[in-house]
Image: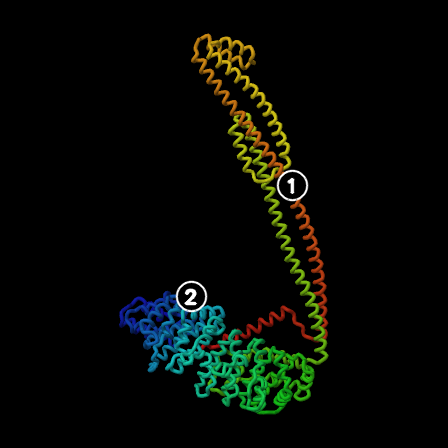
């Protein structure tokens, strides 16, 4: 068969003649129906086998395209590998296009075939579900659920199409999917408006009952565990006058015995999903039962639940009890708040608490379904709530009633009630704070031993988990029963029973001496744990302080390094300036060069080291020398000015030769040149040449005056630099001394912290050794002692068991 199928697949992709292609599609469909797994495997390993099948969806001939849909339905059944290949061959895009072209929910059988193929591709296939979400295909589902105002006269095909569309949404948000994938799809459903569209159908009139039921189930799973979606659902109002919250309208249907059974189950599931991990919603429901918030002019969710709890319809009793139990699930605050609820029983009689009214109805011997519901409510209510246990035990008739129920020999139907009574009595023992003298833990255990017997009590308790309907309820969160009589267990309650059964069995079997020893050991361990926690806290605080000190040391070290770097840079700059100054002094350019040196020195922002003091002293000596030179130059300048005046006078009087002779006798060696020049001028009798020489002398005089001014400026600059360097040097010395002091303090604190930490670690090791000794004593006394690692592994095993139970669920 294998070669023939391969040939058929290859021929199907190469031949486009209608009379060849259409019979080939029909033949392959028939083969897949009869020999599915074998043919799937052959097509899977055939080159381009699945791709050739996908090409049928693009055929322009509707007959071949429609039969190609049927072929792909058979090809993708229960084969994850082929499902993934088909999905990555752009199947989602093509199928959604066909659904839109065919009219969506108003379309014909082709739309149904496309939806069935989509369900095949995504059911139990998380990879394809993620691909569908990442491809933004959820947004394209919103128009499917747009219904007209007039919803009368729905065709059977439209009902089928819409039912499949709702199932497709449920596949994406099913509780059995990975939590992250479900949460992501729920978020997308809200953001694109799909949830709002579903709520519109929920509140619309004229919608067929089966579509309404499936819509309720779909909305339930879209909001389950999503706080944003749950808050939106709480804000939805029914289009009535006056408007009522959608939750109230749905609860009215749940407690109405005239409504279809499947619809009532769907409403209960919706209410459970609304309260799942929603403490805000739980508080709002319980608040409608409290005296301060009751509105006599309107119907609230709490009033409907109380009405259903005490009605004559056993199914309403059970549904209301389970719904109320979900309002208390894992919420100790609301359990205590519910103790405040008071009910008026009849005229002239004082009001009684809700807790007491539940036990009163329980003792009246109503139907099994009613009693099971009330016992589940009481068990959920009192679990992990010692105050509720005290209120229950305070009524003197409650414990005798429970013991009487457990000890009687009743029929098989009553055995479940007996098991739940044993569970409730066990909760009263385990969560008992011994606040009532007559009903302490020890006295209740003695009562069980005398009236019932420990073995019989444990046997009755174990009957709950052995019940057939218990296993069925534990499979998935949605209630799915064929008849109202089968509704006895709630999914979350089965988890609670699994938890409590072990705890109650251990609590009942322990003797008083064992309990006392265990209490003493527990107290001792608690004391030691308290001491250890105190030391841990102290170590944690000191560790924080140590880290803070380390940060401070690091910061100060960085500052010190930066200061050292700055000092090094400034020392280098000073050395460069010193070299420039010496070079310029040698070159004889005092004016511009000294001004340049002053500008560079002014750019030094830092502190000068002590070594520069010698350089400052040397500079001071050079300044003194410059002053002396300046005085000499001033004397020379005065002499030259006198010579010039004489020459000018001689020139004007004509006695230039006599004046020149007198001047030559009085001047030093360097002035002989001027006289010689004057005499040469006289000998040549050229007065113009004498005037040129006088001009040259005037120029030299101007140069000497500029040099004088420059030397004065340099003297002022050097004085200011010396003063600045002295201040910076003092500041640097002070900063270095402060840093050294801080560094010594931090090092001392670090040493002390390390020493204290070592002492604490030694003390902790001693405490651990004592705890280990106490645990060994417990083990020697026969008491089970679990380490932290064992507890974690046990919790992990419980989580794995829960996951295994969920994996067996059918999302539909």
Q: In which quadrant will I find the C terminus?
A: bottom left
Q: Is residue 354 above or below residue 656?
A: below
* Residue 204 in sight: yes
Q: Specify the quadrant of the image occupied by residue 575.
A: top right
**Closer mark to the observer between disc 1 and disc 2:** 1
**Percent of width and height locating residue 53:** 35, 69
Q: Specify the quadrant of the image occupied by residue 407.
A: bottom right
Pointers 1 and 2 in contact (C-beta within 8 Å): no
Regarding mark 1 in the picture, which secondary structure is present there? Answer: helix
Viewed as shown, does residue 59 lie left or right of 87?
Answer: left
Which residue is labeled 2 in the image? 134
Q: Is residue 131 above or below residue 711?
A: below
Regarding mark 2 in the picture, which secondary structure is present there? Answer: helix
Give whichever of 316, 776 is nearer the camera. Answer: 316
- How many marks the image carries: the answer is 2
Give whichever of 216, 206 is nearer the camera. Answer: 206
Viewed as shown, does residue 482 lie left or right of 151?
Answer: right
Please tell me how crowded label 2 is: few (under 14), some (14-19), or many (20+) other residues with Cα within 10 Å: few
* Residue sitting at x 67%, y 60%: 539
Please tell me how crowded label 1 is: few (under 14), some (14-19), or many (20+) other residues with Cα within 10 Å: some
- Colouring used for the render: rainbow
Q: Is residue 331 above or below residue 680?
A: below
Which residue is labeled 1 in the image? 733
Mark 1 and mark 2: Cα distance apart in space: 67 Å
**Percent of width and height locating residue 273:** 49, 76
Earlier residue among tags 1 and 2: 2
Viewed as shown, does residue 58 lie left or right of 352?
Answer: left
Name the disc covering residue 6, or none: none
């Amino acid at each position: 068969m294998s070669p023939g199928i391969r040939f058929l697949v290859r021929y199907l992709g190469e031949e486009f003649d209608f009379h060849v292609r259409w019979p080939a599609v029909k033949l392959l469909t028939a083969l897949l129906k009869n020999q599915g797994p074998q043919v799937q495997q052959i097509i899977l390993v055939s080159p381009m086998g699945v791709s050739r099948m996908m090409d049928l969806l693009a055929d322009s001939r509707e007959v071949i395209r429609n039969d190609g849909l049927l072929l792909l339905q058979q090809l993708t059944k229960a084969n994850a590998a082929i499902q993934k290949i088909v999905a990555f061959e752009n199947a989602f895009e093509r199928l959604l296009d066909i659904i839109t072209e065919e009219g969506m929910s108003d379309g014909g059988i082709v739309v149904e075939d496309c939806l069935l193929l989509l369900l095949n591709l995504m059911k139990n296939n998380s990879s394809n579900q993620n691909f569908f979400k990442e491809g933004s295909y959820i947004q394209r589902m919103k128009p499917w659920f747009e219904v007209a105002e007039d919803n009368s006269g729905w065709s059977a095909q439209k009902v089928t199409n819409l039912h499949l569309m709702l199932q497709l949404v449920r596949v994406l948000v099913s509780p059995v999917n990975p939590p992250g994938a479900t949460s992501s799809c729920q978020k997308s459903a809200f953001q694109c408006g799909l949830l709002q569209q579903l709520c519109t159908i929920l509140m619309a009139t004229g919608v067929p009952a089966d579509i309404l039921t499936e819509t309720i189930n779909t909305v339930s799973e879209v909001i389950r565990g999503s706080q944003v979606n749950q808050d939106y659902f709480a804000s939805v109002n029914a289009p009535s006058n006056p408007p009522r919250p959608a939750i109230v309208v749905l609860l009215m249907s749940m407690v109405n015995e005239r409504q279809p059974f499947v619809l009532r189950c769907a409403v209960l599931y919706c209410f459970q999903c609304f309260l799942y991990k929603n403490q805000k919603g739980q508080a709002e429901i319980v608040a409608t039962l409290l005296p301060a918030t009751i509105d006599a002019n309107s119907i609230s969710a709490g009033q409907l639940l109380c009405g259903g709890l005490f009605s004559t319809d056993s199914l309403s009793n059970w549904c209301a009890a389970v719904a109320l139990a979900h309002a208390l699930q894992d919420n100790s605050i609301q359990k205590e708040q519910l103790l405040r609820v008071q009910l008026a029983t009849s005229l002239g009689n004082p009001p009684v608490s809700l807790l007491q009214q539940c036990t009163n109805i329980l003792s009246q011997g109503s139907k099994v379904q009613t009693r099971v519901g009330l016992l589940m409510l009481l068990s959920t209510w009192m679990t992990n709530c010692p105050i509720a246990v005290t209120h229950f035990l305070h009524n003197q008739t409650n414990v005798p009633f429970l013991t009487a129920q457990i000890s009687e020999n009743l029929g098989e139907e009553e055995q479940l009630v007996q098991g739940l009574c044993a569970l409730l009595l066990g909760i009263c023992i385990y969560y008992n704070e011994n606040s009532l003298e007559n009903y302490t833990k020890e006295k209740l255990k003695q009562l069980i031993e005398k009236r019932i017997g420990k073995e019989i009590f444990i046997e009755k308790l174990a009957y709950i988990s052995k019940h057939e309907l218990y296993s069925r309820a534990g499979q998935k969160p949605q209630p799915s029963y064929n008849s109202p009589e089968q509704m006895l267990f709630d999914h979350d309650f089965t988890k609670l029973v699994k938890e409590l059964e072990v705890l109650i069995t251990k609590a009942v079997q322990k003797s008083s001496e064992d309990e006392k020893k265990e209490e003493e050991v527990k107290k001792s361990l608690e004391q030691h744990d308290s001491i250890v926690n105190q030391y841990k806290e102290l170590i944690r605080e000191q560790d924080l302080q140590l880290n803070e000190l380390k940060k401070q040391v690091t910061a100060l070290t960085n500052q010190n390094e930066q200061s050292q770097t700055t000092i090094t840079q400034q020392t280098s700059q000073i050395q460069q300036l010193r070299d420039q100054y010496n070079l310029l002094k040698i070159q004889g350019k005092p004016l511009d060069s000294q001004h340049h040196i002053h500008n560079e020195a002014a750019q030094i922002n830092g502190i000068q080291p002590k070594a520069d003091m010698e350089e400052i002293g040397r500079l001071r000596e050079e300044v003194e020398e410059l002053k002396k030179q300046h005085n000499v130059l001033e004397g020379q300048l005065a002499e030259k000015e006198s010579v010039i005046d004489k020459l000018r006078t001689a020139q004007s009087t004509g006695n230039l030769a006599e004046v020149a002779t007198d001047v030559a006798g009085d001047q030093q060696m360097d002035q002989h040149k001027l006289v010689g020049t004057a005499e040469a001028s006289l000998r040549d009798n050229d007065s113009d040449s004498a005037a040129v020489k006088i001009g040259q002398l005037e120029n030299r005089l101007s140069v000497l005056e500029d040099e004088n001014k420059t030397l004065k400026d340099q003297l002022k600059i050097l004085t200011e630099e010396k003063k600045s360097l002295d201040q910076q040097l003092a500041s640097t010395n002070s900063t270095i001394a402060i840093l050294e002091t801080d560094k010594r303090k931090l090092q001392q604190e670090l040493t002390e912290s390390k020493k204290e930490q070592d002492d604490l670690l030694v003390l902790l090791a001693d405490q651990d050794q004592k705890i280990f000794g106490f645990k060994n004593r417990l083990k020697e006394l026969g008491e089970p002692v679990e380490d932290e690692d064992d507890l974690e592994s046990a919790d992990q095993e419980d989580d794995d068991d829960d996951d295994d139970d969920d994996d067996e669920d059918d999302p539909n």
